[in-house]
Amino acid sequence: MSDRTIDRVAAATPPPVARKIRGLSDRAIAWIFVAPTIFLLLAINIFPLIWTIRLSFTNYRANRLTREPEFIGLRNYERILTDSDIWLNMQATAHFLFWTIFFQVLIGFTLAWLINKKFKGNDLWTTIIVLPMMLSPAVVGNFWKFLYQPQIGLFNYIVSFFTGKDPSSFEMLGQVNLAPWSIVIVDTWMWTPFVMLICLAGLRSIPDYIYEAAEIDRASKLRQFFTITIPMVLPFLMLAVLFRGIENFKMFDLVVQLTGGGPGSVTELTSINLKREAFEKWRTGYASAYAIILFVTVFGLASIYVKALNKVKER
Amino acid sequence: MSSFSITEPSNRTKWFAGTLVILYAVITMIPLVWIAITGFKSPADAIAYPPKYIVGSESEAGFQPTLEGYVNLFTTRTRQTQDFLDANPPETWADEIVRQYDMVIVGPSKFGERFMNSVIIGFGSTFLSVFLGTLAAYAFSRFKIPLADDLLFFILSTRMMPPIAVAIPIFLMYRQLNLSDTHLGMILLYTAVNISLAVWLLKSFIDGIPTEYEEAALIDGYTRFQAFYKVVLPQAATGIASTAIFCLIFSWNEYAFAVLLTTANAQTAPPFIPTIIGIGGLDWPAIAAGVTLFLLPVMVFTILLRKHLLRGITFGAVRK
């Protein structure tokens, strides 16, 4: 960067003149430009995180202002990790994560593959398919609740129309065996387009000449698909899975509006449980420890995953 | 297979692929279309079974469209005695609609206010994140900043944090600073969430602008600052605009912070819409009307600006 004309001119000019030419020095401008962003992130992201870590070692309750919090060491962590209810929430989260990613990858990749056949008007239809992911998850959860209403809801009507089942015989949101699937369906409806777009970017990055060469070598279409298409799209697909995984691990708004964690606690994902501990039971210290455990889990899993991803990319 | 390009799909493949994709698109639109229709139904029609989906027909599946949902969304109403109703004839079409239930309109509902809060907080935080983001992105793109890569990674990693984990201390901090339930508090919070994406997106746009223009301007006697806003900014306009749309959509849609940190004064629409209650249960047409009005701007934006938006979504994947 130092070999720019302006820097050479400035270096050859006495300091007062240089300042006149350039106004403030580049370094001063750089700091003035970056500082507000860093300051904001420190104030609203990093400082709160440190505060959460500190709170996690106390028994503080945010709704009792007069009582001084006590330092209780690792007791919160111990209690969370040995609590069997929290393991149930973890299981619910794992179920949600696994099946949403499974369906989104399956449908998203298929759609991207079909769109990449470049039929007429494909960009218009892509835009229409993308619409759900642009919407507010809380509002989406809210109106899907209406579609899922037993007896009157459109979802039950359509299912009964195709299967002949009595529409009042099942409740997507009210039955223990169906509720976990109800949130998987809505999340898949909403986020499949995201996986699709990233796969599409992957498919479009494959140069035509690779297929042409395969064609000349008389490789079958099926063989081309498994030896060219899949390996070339895999890094993109894995990245989409990473993004969806992180997002769905944090998932709160959609599910809280749809089921509120019920019935019982079969759809009580960890983030919903965390909200309950922090803002309904007001166990601030305990919830802080919980938050830290979740954060470390996401961060840990994500970094292991990124390592695997980089290996795939290197191949 | 065409003899010109061996990689071009055949017409039959195209037709087949097109049909499947259009079928998926149509299925995916059903919930949204259904909500839009429900907004124009009467409460009785909205919960009728089998569902009514034909406008204005006398058949079993037909319903008479009405603006009742929209009237209920924007007003508060009370039930009145027959004497009162006789003495005060309805003045507007909205009055007439609520008269069917022996009610009168007594004032506006909170929806308008909540919607305006969404607009103020959305635009406020978008402006701030794009403003600060552009400055930071320019600095990262053009100057040698010590530990630039670490700083950039730090900026991005703040997005990994679950909102509730940050919400606990922010709740406590805002209580101390008197920022809870204020527009300013929410604007700052959403800016902090948006700015990481803004810096990354904008840096990639500014990286694409050749430095020669600025250097020429500097030699012509511009200060660095003048060169920035007279030369670089106009060229980065497209990038700035598409970044702004991403920030706006995020702030518009956000729910977790809004529901935890606001109660009345600065509450946005997403936490408010689900709480609309009618007589004897949820007023589904009014909720559907609110949902439609709230989602419509985003859908229109998405369709109009699809090129920039779709590029922005895949940006993360393609860059890395």
Image (cartoon, coloured by chain):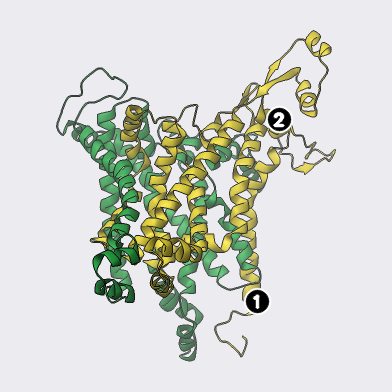
Q: Is residue A262 visible?
A: no
Q: Residue at x 32, y 70 (%)?
A: A312
Q: Residue at x 71, y 39 (%)?
A: B51
Is residue A179 shown left or right of residue B283?
Answer: left
Q: Residue at x 74, y 42 (%)?
A: B53
Identify the element where label 2 is drawn. Answer: helix
* Amino acid type indicated by mark 1: Arg
Residue A188 to residue B45: above or below: below
Residue B277 % position (x, y): 60, 25
Dot 1 or dot 2, earlier in sequence = 1
Is disc 2 on the same chain as disc 1? Answer: yes
Label 1 lies in what chain? B
Q: From the image, which quarter does the N terminus of chain A lie in?
A: bottom left
Say the numbered circle drawn on residue B71.
Answer: 2
Residue A125 % position (x, y): 62, 62
Q: Colour of chain B?
A: yellow
Q: Colour of chain A?
A: green
Residue B279 to residue B223: above or below: above
Residue A80 % position (x, y): 24, 34
Q: What is the crowding at mark 1: few (fewer than 14 residues within 10 Å), some, or many (at least 20)? A: few
Task: Please name the residue that numbered disc 1 is placed on.
Answer: B12
Label 2 lies in what chain? B
In front of the other: A93 or B119: B119
Q: Is residue B122 visible?
A: yes
Say the numbered circle drawn on residue A298.
Answer: none
Residue B308 to residue A297: above or below: below
Identify the element where label 1 is drawn. Answer: helix
